[in-house]
Amino acid sequence: MDKLRIETALIELQSNIRTLAHVVNTINDCPDEVEFLVDCLQPRLAKLKAEFGFDGSDSVTD
């Protein structure tokens, strides 16, 4: 696996996680928006899992 690709994907995922945390902390009274954001991030997480060969037996969770 190309180390630069892995580092780039992790940086992108960290950014998405920070965004989600910000949403949860600032609009916790609007659960529909939080659910929408999580739904938007799920396809990217699935793509990363497939790209890097995670098969569900590791520590990465949905």
Image (cartoon, grey):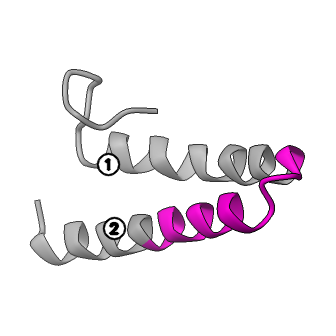
Image coordinates of residue 33 in percent, x first then y, are: 85, 53
Disc 2 marks which residue? 9
Q: For numbered disc 2, what is the local secondary structure?
A: helix
Q: In the image, which residues are magenta?
A: 15-32
Q: Is residue 28 magenta?
A: yes
Q: Secondary structure at mark 1?
A: helix
- Looking at numbered disc 2 in the image, what kind of residue is underneath it? Ala
Left or right, 34 with respect to 43, comes to right
Q: Which picture quadrant has residue 39?
A: top right
User: Is 18 left or right of 30, judged from the image as shown?
Assistant: left
Left or right of residue 60, residue 44 in this image? right
Q: Would you call the spot at circle 1 few (<14 residues within 10 Å), some (14-19), or many (20 or more)?
A: few
Depth order, front residue of 30/5 = 30
The residue depicted at 22 percent of the width and 34 percent of the height is 59
Quadrant containing the N terminus is bottom left
Looking at the image, do the residues carrying marks 1 and 2 touch, with CB atoms under 8 Å apart? yes
Label 1 vs label 2: CA separation?
10 Å
Q: Which mark is first along the chain, 2 or 1? A: 2
Residue type, numbered disc 1: Glu
- The answer to whether 20 appears left or right of 4 in the picture is right
The disc label shown at residue 25, or none: none
- Which one is in front in this view, the residue at disc 1 or the one at disc 2? 2
Q: Which residue is mark 1?
A: 51
Residue at the image position 68 percent from the left and 57 percent from the top = 24
Seen in the picture, residue 52 relative to 26 is either above or below; the reply is: above
Residue situated in front as seen by the camera: 48 or 14: 14
Residue displayed at 53% across by 52% down:
44
Q: Is the residue 35 above or below the residue 26 in the image?
A: above
Q: How many marks?
A: 2
* Residue 3 image offset from top left, x and y in percent: 11, 71
| Identity of the residue drawn at 42% across and 64% down | 13
